[in-house]
Amino acid sequence: MVLLSLLILGVLVNGHLALTPNDCGTSYRRPAYTDIAVYCGTESINLAIQVCPVIYTGYNASLLILNQVANDPSCRGTLDETANPPVVRFNFLLRQLDSCGSIFRTTSAPGTGIFSDFSNIQTVNISGVVRSFDPTIGTVTYNAELSYFYSCAYPLEYLINNTQVDVSSSSIAVIDNNGSFISTLSMQLFKDVNYTTPLVIPALGVELRTRIYVQVIAANLTSQYHVLLDRCYASISALPSNSTFFNLFVPCSQDQMTTMLENGNSQKARFSFPAFRFIEQQNQTISTYYLHCITRLCETSTCTQFKQCNRRRRRDIQTTTIKDGVSDTTLITSGPIRTQADSCMALLYLTILVIIYDSHG
């Protein structure tokens, strides 16, 4: 406590984060539950606390401490006087070592809806508190203690169904959604087993049985989470829930033509399969189908559990506290894979802005 007091006093001596009641105007009032705003981003959590009620209570912005971490400059609040009303902003990364004392807690529950076939769907909760520090020296104080609690819940199963993916690019452009890691995931296609040459579709397309190498990768995510593909399949429609489909692999089973190269061991998962046709489209000059992958981001110590085959379809709800970690899953959908019937060529695209069907050859 003495060390904390010295650190806080040091901040006060520096004279920053200063705001007076006259600067607050009508915002100079008692604290309310709505004084904190929480933004749950894909890489960081941002907090904004109205500072005028803090001043009203007898404190200033420099006396707001995030999770009792006062000796780390990156965990201190920054006064934003341009906001209306003025706020103190805290920003920290979604990594245990950089999260300023936040608590990471993972909850597991049976899957529902589109994930009803999965026995264990995880959600990670990242929480903490910003408290006021009272510098009063003595037996009593007349300042009320302020506590601002925050919590961000990130679902651990996602269904990414974005067909606007360019084979020459390496990511899916998705706007940040509160509590979502969807934008950290991307699908890439390659033509070689070393994953060094992106797949570029020739004018006449790729031949049937040409092996397509698929990579799903997580970017800008803390290293203690790995990518685990729960299921990958192809469907005739871009909307997989209403279409004929073919499983390339599902948990504990895969098509004999599919080769799994890496899964659940790092921040990328890799597999390959040969270009094929749907028999249902045999009368079409060009047949089209889409590739989908349900993808999970699992904490490194739990990936092995998800890879195990268990006859129990559903597990009991579990809650565990983890040192580092988030777990996520999503369905990544490619653009159309097109096959020419008359020349036995398969043409694969990852953008579906224009699809031409030539039924006359």
Image: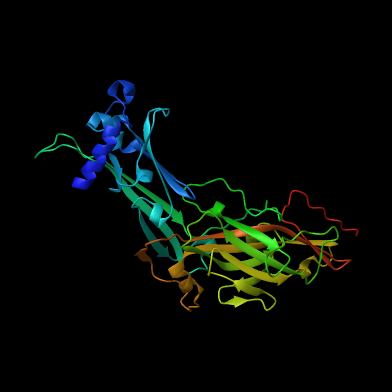
Is residue 111 visible to the viewer in this orientation of the structure? no
Residue 190 appears at what percent x and percent y?
70, 63
Residue 58 appears at what percent x and percent y?
22, 31
Q: Left of 155 or right of it: where is 12?
A: left
The quarter of the rendered structure image containing the C terminus is bottom right
Identity of the residue furthest to the right in this view: 360
Nearer to us in this view, 36 or 188: 188
In the image, residue 18 sits, relative to residue 260, either above or below, namely above
Nearer to us in this view, 83 or 278: 83
Q: Left of 49 or right of it: where is 281?
A: right
Residue 68 appears at what percent x and percent y?
27, 48
Q: Left of 31 or right of it: where is 272?
A: right
For the point 59% across and 66% down, which residue is it?
Answer: 269
In the image, residue 347 sits, relative to residue 138, either above or below, namely below
In the image, residue 13 sits, relative to residue 122, either above or below, namely above
Identity of the residue furthest to the left in this view: 139
Is residue 61 visible to the viewer in this orientation of the structure? yes
For the point 25% across and 40% down, which residue is it?
Answer: 8
In the image, residue 228 sits, relative to residue 96, either above or below, namely below
Tally the numbered discs: 0
The picture quadrant where one finds residue 289 is bottom right
Colour pattern of the rendering: rainbow
For the point 79% across and 59% down, which residue is it?
Answer: 201
For the point 46% across and 63% down, which residue is it?
Answer: 224
Residue 10 appears at what percent x and percent y?
26, 38
